[in-house]
Image (cartoon, helix red, strand yellow):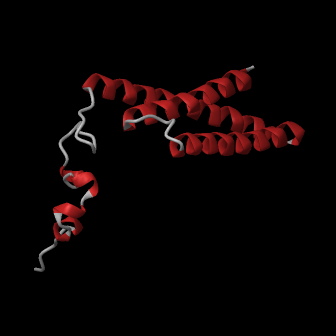
Amino acid sequence: MPTVTTPTAAVPDTMMPFGQMPFGQMPFGQMPFGQMMDPLAMSRLAFDWWRLCMESSQVIALRSMRMMQGGAVAQREAVRMVSEKWETAALLGMSAATGQAGNTPETAMRGAMQRYQTKVSANRRRLSR
C-alpha cells in the first residue's frame, strides 16, 4: 500500500506563510501573527454569523415570494437585489484593499458582517410590510 504524504510535508518551514505552522497544525484560537483570539469574542462572532444567516434566509424567502408575483415589482426587486450585492462587495473590497477593514481577521470579519447585517435587516423590514 503506497504511503500518502501531505503537501505541507515537502514545504520547508521558511516557505510557510508568516513563518508559522501549516494552517491545520495551528493551535485552536491562534491567529496567523501569533495573536490569540478571545474565546468569548469567538462565540459572539459565531452567534452574530448565525443570526445573519438566519435573517438572510428570511430575506431570501420574502424575495422569492415577491418575485413569484411577477410584473414590475418583481423586476425592480431583482435589479435591486443584484445591485445591492455588487455595491456591498465593492465597498468591502475597497475597505480591505485600503486597510480600513481592520488590522486583525476578527475586526475585518466583524466589519464585513456589520455591513451585511445592516443591508439584510433593512431588506427584511422593507419586504415584511
Compare residues 78 and 96 and report the one nearer the observer.
96
Taking the spot 59% from the left edge, 44% from the top edge, the residue there is 94
Query: Is residue 100 visible in the rendered structure shown here?
Result: yes
Position of residue 115 in the picture relative to residue 18 (left or right):
right
Q: In the picture, which quadrant includes the C terminus?
A: top right
| 105 vs 19: above or below | above
Question: What number of labels is visible?
Answer: 0
Q: Is residue 46 left or right of residue 127?
A: left
Q: Tell me: 15 left or right of 104.
A: left
Q: Is residue 86 left or right of residue 43?
A: right
- Residue 71 locus on image (x, y percent): 88, 41
Looking at the image, which is closer to me, 107 or 127?
A: 107
**Residue 82, x across and y down, in percent:** 71, 45
| Residue 55 visible in this rendered orientation of the protein | no
Residue 4 position, x and y percent, is: 16, 72
Q: Quadrant of residue 92?
A: top right
Which is nearer the eye, 57 or 41?
A: 41
| Residue projecting furthest to the front | 98
On the image, the x and y values in percent for residue 79 come to 78, 44
Quarter of the image where one finds residue 44 = top left
Q: Residue furthest bottom?
A: 1
Residue lying at 44% horizontally and 26% vertically, measured from the top left = 48
- The part of the image, by quadrant, that contains residue 3 is bottom left
The N terminus - image quarter: bottom left
Residue at the image position 27 percent from the left and 40 percent from the top? 31
